[in-house]
């Protein structure tokens, strides 16, 4: 199944089988066939849809069902992204269909349960509901990386402690594919969300200088965070446009991705790696309160002491 051609052939085969299926009376089945949506047991025709993700196609079907007068909708899924998308689009759907009532049958086995999207959105409020898809993408989803050692629960707690991040997430959702740079207002807000009370680069330096600190536990550089945010923007805006059957998605090459060997790979950073940019990292272990002596490694190398050194004799 790693070969896309095999996947396409499998779906074509299943589509052909479903087309000839007889469905019970008063039941309708809709099958996706590339950009076409085939109705079985109905004369209703849905418009063409070029969505690549099944998650966003579900939103199209919800919208279509509401337009046909069905206010109560049940969706069966095991994908968390579907929950996030339904919450993110709930209030937009309510604007056209005030009586919408959406339920979710989620999970399998002993983890199976029902979620009422109306209740979830009521508890979150309008702003957090709109901001949930960008938050989900920023803290890690199928196409974006997560922060090492930071689960969704930790990310949620950080969001509650940094409520101004809500405005940044909403801005991403409401301004499709707007370019972002290090000095952008909303990027600086997301930087503060990532590392509270200090900039990413300062926090990285401080933690790097501490002994026994794993590199995986050190925050990313601003440049790395910017590339991550670009990938968040393109994924969030794909989700935001779920209510439109036809999406116009820009090249991922402009949004934190690069094409290598006919596949897209993340751009982790655009600045040189520290190990390559620095010929050597010199530090001393001088303990004297009077300062470094002639045997100091930094003095021998003709360098000033840095945060890596134990003495701190020339940092002021």
Image: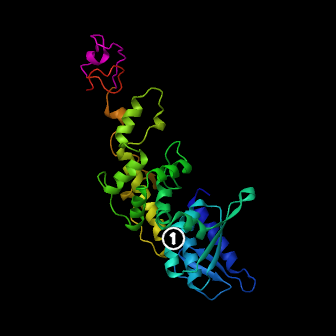
Please tell me which residue lies in front, 170 or 6: 170
Please tell me which residue lies in front, 129 or 112: 129
Residue found at x 49% / y 79% = 95
Q: Is residue 312 magenta?
A: no
Look at the image and tell me in which quarter the C terminus lies.
top left
Please tell me which residue lies in front, 247 or 94: 94
Residue 15 appears left or right of 283: right
Q: Which residues are magenta?
A: 281-303
Look at the image and tell me in which quarter the N terminus lies.
bottom right
Expressed as whole percent of the image width and height from the top left, the position of residue 102 reads: 61, 73
Residue to which mark 1 is pinned: 89
Expressed as whole percent of the image width and height from the top left, the position of residue 107 reads: 68, 60
The answer to whether one can see residue 304 in this image is: yes
Residue found at x 42% / y 63% = 170
Question: In the image, is residue 209 above or below residue 243?
Answer: above
Residue found at x 35% / y 15% = 286
Residue 164 appears left or right of 79: left
């Amino acid at each position: 199944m790693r070969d896309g051609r095999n996947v396409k052939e499998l779906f074509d085969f299943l589509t052909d089988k479903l087309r000839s299926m007889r469905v019970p009376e008063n039941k309708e089945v809709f099958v996706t066939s590339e950009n076409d949506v085939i109705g079985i047991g109905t004369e209703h025709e849905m418009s063409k849809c070029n969505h690549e993700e099944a998650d966003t196609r579900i939103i199209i079907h919800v919208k279509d069902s509401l337009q046909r007068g069905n206010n109560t909708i049940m969706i069966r899924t095991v994908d968390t992204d579907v929950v996030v998308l339904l919450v993110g689009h709930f209030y937009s759907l309510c604007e056209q269909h005030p009586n919408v009532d959406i339920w979710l049958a989620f999970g399998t086995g002993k983890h199976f349960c029902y979620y009422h999207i109306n209740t979830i959105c009521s508890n979150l409020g309008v702003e957090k509901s709109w901001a949930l898809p960008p938050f989900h993408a920023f803290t890690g989803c199928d196409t974006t990386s997560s922060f090492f050692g930071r689960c969704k629960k930790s990310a949620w707690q950080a969001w509650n402690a940094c409520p101004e991040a809500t405005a940044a997430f909403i801005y991403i959702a409401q301004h499709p594919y707007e370019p972002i740079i290090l000095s952008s207002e909303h990027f600086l807000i997301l930087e503060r969300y990532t590392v509270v009370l200090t900039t990413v680069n300062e926090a990285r330096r401080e933690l790097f200088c501490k002994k026994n600190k794993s590199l995986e536990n050190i925050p990313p550089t601003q440049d790395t965070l910017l590339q991550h945010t670009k990938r968040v923007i393109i994924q969030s805006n794909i989700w935001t446009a779920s209510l439109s059957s036809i999406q116009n998605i820009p090249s991922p090459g402009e949004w934190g991705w690069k094409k290598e060997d006919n596949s897209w790979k993340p751009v982790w950073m655009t600045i040189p790696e520290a190990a390559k940019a620095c010929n050597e990292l010199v530090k001393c272990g001088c303990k004297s309160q009077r300062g470094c002596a002639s045997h100091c490694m930094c003095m021998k190398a003709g360098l000033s002491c840095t945060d890596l050194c134990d003495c701190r004799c020339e940092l002021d």
